[in-house]
Image (spheres, rainbow, N blue to C red):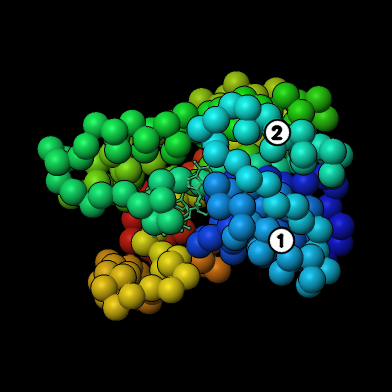
Amino acid sequence: MSSEKPGAVIVTGAAHGIGAEYADRLVRDGWSVVVADLDYEAAHKKVQQLTADGGRALAVRVDISKEDEIAAMVDATLKTFGTIAGLVNNAAVFSVVPMSRAPFGDIELDEWDLMFRVNVRGTWQVCKAVVPHMAENGYGKIVNISSGTALKGSASRIHYVSSKGAIVSFTKTLAKEVGAKGVRVNCVAPGSTLSEEDPDEKTIEYRQSRVTDRALPRVQLPADLAGAVSFFLSPDSDFITGQTLVVDGGTHMH
Ligand SMILES: NC(=O)c1ccc[n+]([C@@H]2O[C@H](COP(=O)([O-])OP(=O)(O)OC[C@H]3O[C@@H](n4cnc5c(N)ncnc54)[C@H](O)[C@@H]3O)[C@@H](O)[C@H]2O)c1
């Protein structure tokens, strides 16, 4: 474990998948990590594992589309760790809360609304609750999670891809609004990642099929993304804001 960091980092959607890997890495980096997720049982289990390994972590049940639950998450973080230094907006409708991979005309209205309520509005709501505390300290780091698919397009699940496209513009706009307060806002766009805890044959085949598009031809794993998030939370990136870093083995180059 590296040197202790001031304050806490909230990672939404950290009970499963890639978010759980971010939590592992950030605890190893020395942060106090809030594992915030819809699935409290899994968040609690993750925190038990992190603290057993000597880290500081707190499990919080939150639905990022609900303002009162976000407020309770922020309160619990401040009560336990004192300050909020970082926020990773990772929670999304994706796999644990599943989406349809359907043609654009077949997406149900309710699913479109859920996608934007969680992935876009939820990200905004969490930022609204957290930024004032960062501004009070004159320093803070926000990392949003988009997707490589939003940059290159995809021939299905237009609701998901559009929501992840919105995260790139959201990142740029928020970065401009809060920079003078010392808050940096960046974004990571992952490629297709084998993030499922117990993937079936079909899922493994699908992730494998993405390999041919890559300059670095192998399956992408959650650990491939953790370094980028760690960097955006570290002082090494203090003069970088509003940027989207694509981490996909060289599928999309921009
Ligand atoms: N896996 C990939 O191939 C891939 C590729 C590009 C981008 N991403 C993005 O990376 C992030 C993580 O992806 P993943 O594969 O780990 O997804 P996942 O579905 O495995 O994990 C998402 C987590 O978010 C939580 N969550 C869902 N809705 C929530 C809500 N309303 N409030 C709080 N928590 C909620 C879930 O419980 C889960 O723990 C997502 O933003 C996803 O869009 C993933």
Give the structural element (helix, strand or loop) at label 1. Answer: helix
Q: Residues within 10 Å of mark 1 (few under 14, many from 20)?
A: many
Structural distance between the alpha carbons of marks 2 and 1 = 18 Å
Asked if the residue at label 2 sits under 8 Å from ligand 1, the reply is no
Please indicate, yes or no, whether residue 127 appears anywhere in the rendered image: no
Q: Which of 135 and 95 is in front in this view?
A: 95
Residue beneath the point at 43% across and 67% down: 196
Q: Name the side, left or right, on which 154 lies relative to 95.
A: left
List x then y, in percent, for residue 135. 75, 26
Give the structural element (helix, strand or loop) at label 2. Answer: helix
Quadrant assignment, res 178: top right
Q: Nearer the viewer, residue 240 or 233?
A: 233
Quadrant assignment, res 70: top right
Q: Which of 146 and 246 is in front in this view?
A: 146
Q: Name the side, left or right, on which 123 lies relative to 28.
A: left
Residue beneath the point at 45% across and 65% down: 195
Please name the residue that numbered disc 1 is placed on. 47
Q: Which residue is situated farthest in the front direction here?
A: 41
Quadrant assignment, res 227: bottom right
Please indicate, yes or no, whether residue 133 appears anywhere in the rendered image: yes
Residue type of the residue flagged with mark 2: Ala
Residue beneath the point at 39% across and 41% down: 164
Please name the residue that numbered disc 2 is placed on. 72
